[in-house]
Image (cartoon, rainbow, N blue to C red):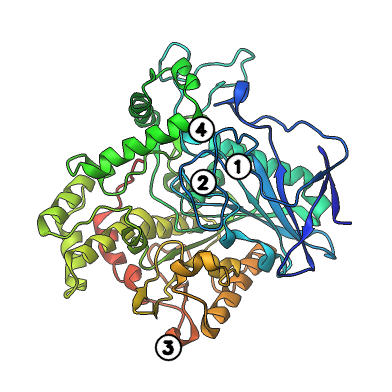
Amino acid sequence: MDVFTTKAGAVRGRRAARDRGIVAVLGLPYAAPPFGDLRFRAPRPVEPWDGVRDCSAFGPVAPQSAELPGAPVWSPGDEDILTLNIWTPADGPGDLPVLVWIHGGAYVFGSAAQPDFDGTALAGRGLVVVTLNSRIGFEGFGHVPDAEGHDGPAPDSDGSGTPFPDNRGLLDQIAALEWVRDNISAFGGSPDRVTLAGQSSGATSVACLTVADRARGLFRRAVLHSAVNAFATVEQAARTTAEVAGAAGVPATRAGLLAAPPEALVAAADRVCERYAQDPGSGQRHYDPAIYGPVADGVLLTADPLEALAAGAGGTVELLVCHTTEEYWLLDAVGSSAKITTEEQLAAFAADFGLPASLVEGHRERLPDAPVLDVYLSLYSGLLFAEYSTRLAEAHALAGGRAFLARFDRRRDHTGQRVRAWHCADVPFAFGNLHEESVHFLVGGPPGAADQELSRRMTRAWADFAAHGDPGWDALDGLAGSGAAVRVWRTAEERQGTEHGHGLGAADGFRDLWRTAGLPLLAP
């Protein structure tokens, strides 16, 4: 029987459909449901249970309005959302390396139940794979004022800290890592060989936990795919709270926010984002309305992860950082980004983000035949994802840490549509889930033999990094901008005999422009 004993009770999983040698344990609670008296509070331990708990299906997802292909949707009343999923070899030797995955979704959507995050293939590589749900949206990242409506921290009655802390989503992730530390040996994993991984907002969450003292010692390695350049001050988070509360028709106070059900705050946030999207004069949020993110609360986080890594806060954690070479083209393809098609709009974009004219002109010169839209998308790719991700790896290396850097540059022309090396396309390759129909939009239809071969190389890199700290290429040498050790992921048909060095895709070709211009740190 595929029964495992955790500190809270026994659980039963099921054999994975794709590989009967892998056991999947799904919807396993790692903390108590964060609603009722626990709403907006730090995660609390799960209540133990008697007997054997059936864990053969994913648990509910966090409050959100998104409906993603192949994944569950949230419904009001779904509260047992702090769950995780485990894939482990049925007859593994024990003491296996562990990979813990945090999904992306702009801190407002997504879940561990998405088909592209199935851990079967990676478990077949000798890993114990854990994916988790944590609070997102206002529930996870909204700032809750103190009881008097002020924006400073309110001391708990027992002096333990703030009763309604910022960064509750990150605190959930720490609780999941603590659960892994205390329980993963029952599933054949080693608590001393944990790698924390994530993509997009999940990657930035990983970066935050890498520099957070509260998470110290819970993982030894970290994988970041397409970390997003977004980090808020308490004052900025408080302004977002006022906007969301206003849209929900409640006071921007603790009592007012607690009185608003989760679905009301989800709908209110959607209305706030839509207003920004419809208003070209609304500044940075007009272009990609994302209003939540990690908060420099002075408790869990004191600085942006890039600044903290540069100061050595990453310690001995080893980093593997990857971004795609055409990140922002996905956001344009799905209609979540402003359409910038004129020179006047491009100039306004540059002004709103404080980008120097030399940076814009440099992109235009290197894309001489491209429409204005492509110049904009290239600029935004670097600003929001590619340059920030690269700098995280370089900052860690310069501070004495061990860091590896990769770029995903696989493209495909399929059924008359060009699929770029855009945001999210690398994830199903690294998980080994190209067969999933729900990812075919991302990767351009069913995979070919060259795609499968690329996927095998990427899953092997993740597995080897998690097991030994060596993904298969050299670490950065600590020389700023050297670029001497960058793995570029392409199919054999695209590689043309090289995977290292410069000139390997659009993002790499603009690095010198960004170094001269600097990188403004953005707020959600």
Please say whether residue 99 is visible from this viewpoint: yes
Question: Disc 4 on helix, strand or loop?
Answer: helix
Would you identify the image quadrant in which residue 419 lies? bottom left
Distance from the alpha carbon under mark 1 to that under mark 2:
9 Å
Residue mark closest to the camera, 1 vs 3: 1
Left or right: 513, with 205 as reference point = left
Which numbered marker is on residue 173? 1
Mark 3, residue position? 496
Residue 139: numbered disc: 4
Closer to the eye: label 1 or 4: 4
Q: In this view, does 411 lie above or below 93?
A: below
Asked which secondary structure carries label 1, the reply is: helix
Residue 373 x/y as whole percent:
21, 63
* Pointers 1 and 2 in contact (C-beta within 8 Å): yes
Comparing 283 with 505, the one in front is: 283
Q: What residue type is labelled 2?
A: Ser
Q: Which amino acid does label 1 sit on?
A: Gln
Q: x, y percentage for residue 184?
A: 77, 50
